[in-house]
Image (cartoon, helix red, strand yellow):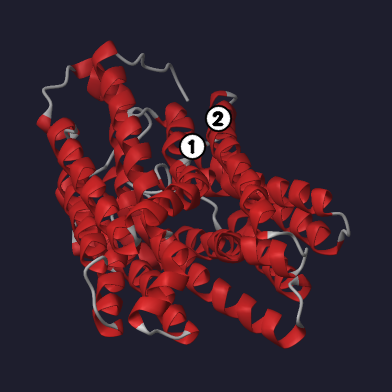
Amino acid sequence: MSATMTVTPRVKKIQRTALAMLVISGSVNYIDRATLAVGNPLIRHDLGLSVADMGFLLSAFLWSYAFAQLPMGALVDKFRPRWMLTIGLSLWSLAQVVSGLVGSFGQFYVARIALGIGEAPQFPSASRVTRDWFNPRDRGLSSGIWNTAGPLGTALGVPLLTVLMLNFGWRWMFIIMGIAGLLVAALWFTVYRNPRDVALAAEENQYRTQGDDVGQRHHMTFREWRMLFGFRTTWGMILGYFGCIYMTWIYFAWLPGYFEIQRHMSVKYTGIAAAIPFAWGVVGSLCGGYLADVLVRRGITPINSRRYPAGIALIGTAGFTLVAAYVTSNNLAIAFISAAIFLLYITSTCAWALSSVAVPPNLTASVGAMQNFGGYLGGALAPTVTGLIVASTGSFVLALVVGSVVSVFSAGAYLLIVKNPITTAQIDRVADV
């Protein structure tokens, strides 16, 4: 990259404020995902639901979240993050409030679908904010910072929600979190501004757009969105993120159960043991972003600075997961799972940072949402596949082996399929064919 531009104090303040709000909203996003799991026993008792019913409710969120990614990414690119994240926050928070008022399985199922749709704009919006306000050499660490919301919300969610439930009941647990989300939505809409709404100086615009596609357009069209599916880079990102989120949801959905069933840990100790690996996920998210930026500054192309660490870290995740599956020591298992999740969040951060350099600016949220769609197809399958394997074998070992194989496959997608960034000129050529 040629001579780099210096960020002005005003843009730096906008960046810091936006990142802080994205971490807050993303943490609320992940805490809200955990409400049903935390309230599971009491909800089943009060509403007369079976274990199978709870499984359907848990999967309702995952499937609606996955399929909502495709339109939401395009909408974020068209209407920008200020409006779309406000709408998303408001919808998913209202869904939480409604979840505290439901009286039947059907009502709860609809609320969970609404939760998935509402949460869909969060990460595509964050990716677009990164593209809009950061120079390419700074987009890795910024992605790493807002991506910490995943493991941070996961680590904080269970103890926080448990306190709310024990003190106020499961219904008020949902309602309180919904009100908190509505307050965050109001804060985001009040404080955040898209670049086109700010009177930026020439040097500030040059800092933001340095290295971007020369033929870039400012507005997304459906034709361009559709053309993204014609490129190997898009499919490499979709297949790569499939394995990343598949592994994430094995650990997110089953880690406490794994420690209790496979490792025979007490419930009290399981809570602590399950939080440790996700704390390392926060560190991994930051390290992945920092690594991507360092590689760019050392002359590696922006796209290679993301795809190489994403693929290599995913292979490492597979390796540590395999070792954890077979070691006899519980402490070593926690250590190896912590290493796996540390590397997993390096992959996750680099994947999101990849979306900020792989396509023209007006398609950033779109391609990010496409990869997240692929990821959450894996996320929706992982808990079910893992549960079926454990039910049939009585052990988590084979389930972890399957997860490791999926991880290696997806690592290959980053290393072998993702190659070059997609340019506006390439999209136009595909459209003309």
Q: Where is residue 313 in the image (x, y as percent from the top left)?
A: 67, 48
Along the line of sight, the residue nearer the viewer: 188 or 67: 188
Q: Do the residues labelled 1 and 2 touch (CB within 8 Å)?
A: yes
Residue corresponding to mark 2? 290
**Which x, y percent locates residue 385?**
60, 79
The image quadrant of residue 257 is bottom right
The residue under the point 46% across, 65% down is 37
Left/right of residue 107 with respect to residue 186 in the rendered view: right
Classify 51 as above or below 40: below
Residue 61 visible in the picture: yes
For mark 1, give the secondary structure: helix
Q: Nearer the viewer, residue 63 or 79?
A: 63
Q: Is 128 above or below relative to 374?
A: above
Q: Which amino acid does label 2 sit on?
A: Tyr
* 5 relative to 179 in the view: left or right: right
**Marks 1 and 2, the one that precedes in the sequence:** 1
The residue depicted at 21 percent of the width and 66 percent of the height is 98
Hey, which residue is sitting farthest front in the picture? 167
Amino acid type indicated by mark 1: Gly
Where in the figure is residue 99, as x and y percent of width and height? 26, 67
Which label belongs to residue 296? none
Relative image position of residue 82 (x, y in whole percent): 18, 42
Q: Which residue is drawn at 19% across and 60% down?
A: 94
Q: Which corner quadrant holds the C terminus?
A: bottom left
Q: Mark 1 points at which residue?
A: 144
- Helix, strand or loop status at disc 2: helix
Count residues near mark 1 (Cα–Cα under 10 Å), then give few for <14, some for 14-19, many for 20+.
many
Kindly report the distance in space between the C-alpha atoms of the residues bearing marks 1 and 2.
7 Å
Q: In which quarter of the image is residue 186?
A: top left
The residue that appears at 41% across and 38% down in the rendered structure is 146
Q: Is residue 308 visible?
A: no
118 left or right, relative to 151: left
